[in-house]
Amino acid sequence: MIETFSNMIEACGSKAEVMRGSLVYAVLSAIAQGMAYALLFPLFAALAAGSDEAWWYLGGIVVLVLLDGLFRLGESHGGWRVYIEVSDETRTNLGEQLKRMPLEQLAKRQTGDLNSVLTGNVQDVVSIAGGLFGIVINTMVAPTVTIIATFFIDWRLAIAMLILFPMAIPVYRTIRAAGARENRISMTAHADAASHIVEYTQGLSVLRATRQVGPESQRLQASLARLREAQVAGTKLVTLPSIIMSALVQIGILAITALAISFVLADSLSMAAVLALIVIAIRFSEPLALFANMSSMFDFMEAAIDRIGELLAVPPLPQADSKVGVEGSHVVFDNVTFAYDQTDEEVLRGVSFEVPERSLTALVGSSGSGKTTITKLLTRFADPQTGSIEIGGVDVRSMTQTELMRHFSVVFQDVYLFDDSIEENIRLAKPSATHEEIIAAATAANGHEFISALPNGYATSVGEIGGALSGGERQRISIARAILKDSPIVILDEPTSALDTESEVAVQRAIDTLVRDKTVLVIAHRLSTVVAADNIIVLEEGQIVEQGSHDQLLSKNGRYADMWHAQRADRHWQITDTMPAET
Amino acid sequence: MNQMTDTNLMQDAAEEPGLWTIISPVNREIYTGMTVSLLSLVAWLGSIMLFLPISREITSATPDPERLWLLLGISFGLVALSFVCRAWSFRISHLGAFRLEQILRTELTTRLAQVPLGYVVNTGSGPLKKIVLDDVRSLHAFVADSTPLFAKTFAAPVLGIILMLILDWRLALLSLALFPIGLIGMFFAFRDYDVARKKVDQATERINGVINEYVQGMHVVRTFDDGSGSFERYRKALNGATETMREWTAQSQTGAFIARTLFAALPTVLVLLAVGIPMYLEGMIELSILMMFLLLAPTVTESIVPIVWLQQLLTNAAAAVKRIGQLRQVELIPEVSSGRAPEDASVELKNVTFRYEGREDNALTGVNITIPAGTVTALVGASGAGKSTVAQLIPRFWDVDDGALLVGGVDVREMTADQLLQSVAFVFQSPFLLSDSIKNNIRLGQPDATDEEIVAAAKAAQAHDFIMNELPDGYDSVVGERGSSLSGGQRQRITIARAILQDAPIIVLDEATAFADPDNEAKIHQALAALAQGKTLIVVAHRLSTIVDAHQIVVLDKGRVVESGTHNQLVANGGRYAKLWAHFEQAQGWGLRVAEPSSAT
């Protein structure tokens, strides 16, 4: 419990002090409340004696209630405001971490997971911390204060009350354990159901054809039934202990009352004390009984804190601080060997090659041969285990991220556009660009014409027209970005392969402009597009098997020549090849 | 107060008429849960009421121990009963809520099989999963937690007030006097609650949207700058949302503070004492009555707190109910109970007009296409021309708005879903695989196929070799498990094997445009050839070279057929297709070069 508190305070970052202050106020407020209730003992005694002293005690209670109000004001002053600032700060830190952490680590995490950390987990910590901690402190501190005060009235009763607390601890532990178990069971069952529902919706056309839908879809129905079983089992798991806990508290309080009554009958306790005790005991019983149910919230919050902490703990790739003199854009891979994090399989083995400035180098090979890994290492997606990568004579590890990225433009098959205007989407590559520069870039990327035809031209929001942009148009926007950035090295990952014919021509023209006089590294599937390359690197299982110009490689009659001939043949493949001729 | 909140709740509920309908299958559990929870409350209040005779006995001159123990015993019994009832009601309502979840999920997934397939495809499996799993799940909290809460929050104050009135009406009225004061506090606290709440919800939504975008774009953004640009966007949006939250807190804080302070136990105790002490000293009430009020009154005031939770539960449920309701309102695709089977493998579009819901322009206008059995037809055109729409209409992803679509001479609307889908196989660009064994994935095409038939289909689809040589357990390997990760091309070949096994006479093929590598591409071509053998084939073509020999090429532009014929006819026509073809040849001849051709090596 204490640990959760300190974890939470730590999670508050720079607001930890305010948070701590707020908690102190909560404790003070609980103490005032506990003392106010404790005053009921002398108050009832005075009343029973018919004495006017009762007014003094009432005055005492008034003061304590006012103090309680003040302390609460102090608590709420930090209160929600702190939580808002904390969530803002945590999200900023997480945002910075995302931009700093190695891309390899980023790629390992699913977008959905990252999303849920930044939205859900932050929300969990903040709202639970905001709503719950005051209550928890109050529930624990106020009764304790009253019990301590009871010592002055009757030490036997106070001890009886003190014994009640430790008795609840083992039950409380059981509840927490049961809660955690239930949580795991239900999470697994939900994940299973989720994947089956996704499967079902994706496969509906096939499933419909074979009537395996709705109640007849056995896999899905079985999974839904399993989910309910898990839920029911989980509920059964937690019901009993939490009921026992509540019952224990309530019955325990009744037992203490019974004990007090027996003291009265034995004439060793005043009846006024018993009346006060009944009021106090009933007052505290409900919150104490419900207290156990809050434990699942703590687990929830701790899990959230853990997930946030885990993400923040990913170390960034080591970066050099000093400015280094990068000269030109000559790229050198020297004996590079690389395996992805937590795998033994080397996806690149002793890869060495050079890309002279303003030359065109193509990477070819079957999928999984290491083409993409090479471009990823160049942009420092991760660092190789051995060997080095240099740009302009400088090791990429001794450049800052900003310096390194200044060298590249990357054009992928998939284009990511932000929900902002077309202009801002292009400007992202060079925040200081003027409107004229953006138009110039778009024009060079063969995009000015279609952008001008959009309802608001360059100011058209991508979100509003979303699907109305074709793949080729999106691609041209991304090329306009790259042209605006005007970096010396261009990396292309088969940017035209997913386009229809007409877009393809437009995008090809845009690429022609982009790559002029640049150092270009291209991943090519269709070999005909890189015939003019200065160097073609053929990869197989992480190793370079051949390299040279198209003509050189063809005359070698090796792997490249095979691929070339296979593609030439397949190019004339027709869907009608096996069909009977004209019917 | 209760009255007011009560009506508010009812209004909210009335705005979402779906809620009560949606949860009606488990009405029995809900009512039982409420009743039992009420019983628990009554037992608990009873145990408290017993303190009146107990305290009277104690304060009497000669307390009767036997009677005291008896009373305490009964009180014990009532507390125990109250807990049994509470547990019982918890269980009933939770089990009911789980049952509801399953009922709803089965209903929704059944419904998904009856709405236009296009709706399912366009909505996407992610959002649909969210509705079927997460939204249904968020109803659970409402059904399971709020029904007992309903009984308790409304019954507890009412019963409490009645009991107090019986005990001493003067003191009862006094303790009720606090209510209006608290109400005023609440009024100020929640004056603009709805408006502010909406603002905050919007801010939250915006934060979530921005985070989503930031995270999604990060992989890409990191490749063209160090992330600073998009971080700035993120930071700015975050700031804006945080500002809204700050304003909201500043606005609602004081009111909420007042309400929280007034509706706490201590102030009530204080007021009761201030009035109760002189009344007692004047001999107007006995000490036991004062004690009973100290027990009961805070229970009444504190019952306000759960009402706020209830409100929250309703708000949460409302969003989920809305989405579930939307899915339930998607119009079913009307299906005949006994349909007419298609007579052959021909397809005909007769003057078809179709518009996607919510769009202004027709996706297809007056389209006529005749496709004789056993022929190959290619649909070509720019993106957005309508070729994919034509392809989707054939397996009845949507119904046409005007005209008719005939398969084997029968209007698709006059066939049952399985009659139609057994004659038409749709091979998607993105292959769909179950996380099940390879064997079962292929068998999906024809559930009663033998193992031999499955192997034969896999062989024809060029998949047998890699299944046997590269997968750990051959045909029993489970897709996606360790060692069984498949490349895009391999997945594609398995779906083709499934289509081969399904053996539908009409194949609609959305030609995949990009394959991972040349080896795979050649194999997929062979697999497709095996699939297409002797079938009516309709291809959405991207690469024109593959369909040069098609019996018929249909060229679409802006939802209309602009020309059709064989490749040679169309090229000779010099129309739209001829232009496309010229473009295609130009694209094929394109090669990258960093310098002007003259200076290239």
Image (cartoon, grey):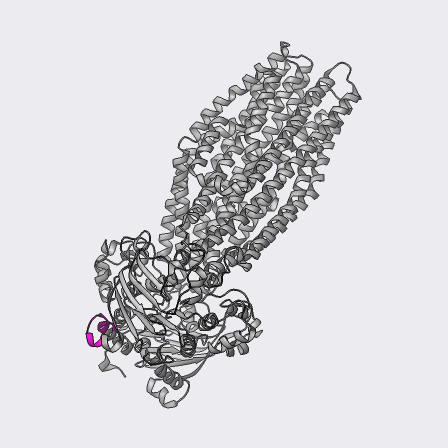
Magenta highlight on residue B573: yes
Q: Is residue A261 above or below residue A93?
A: above
Image-based side of B282 in relation to B559, left or right: right
Image quadrant holding the C terminus of chain B, namely: bottom left
**Residue A528 at what x, y percent from top left?**
32, 80
- Find the magenta span and give its range: B571-580
Pick the front one: B324 or B559: B559
**Residue A379 at what x, y percent from top left?**
40, 68
Name the residue at 27% across, 53% down. Answer: B360
Camera sees residue A329: no
Q: Quadrant of residue A34?
A: top right
**Residue A382 at what x, y percent from top left?**
46, 68
Number of numbered discs visible in the structure rendering = 0
Pick the front one: B467 or A98: B467
Q: Quadrant of residue A218?
A: bottom right
**Residue A210 at what x, y percent from top left?**
49, 63
Pick the front one: A557 or B532: B532
Q: Is residue B474 above or below residue B176?
A: below
Camera sees residue A207: yes
Name the residue at 54% across, 29% down. Answer: B154
Q: Is residue A457 above or below residue B307?
A: below
Name the residue at 30% across, 68% down. Answer: B370
Predominant secondary structure, magenta span: helix
Image-based side of B274 in relation to B491, left or right: right
Magenta highlight on residue A469: no
Residue projecting furthest to the left: B574
Image-based side of B262 in relation to A231, left or right: left
Residue projecting furthest to the top: B282
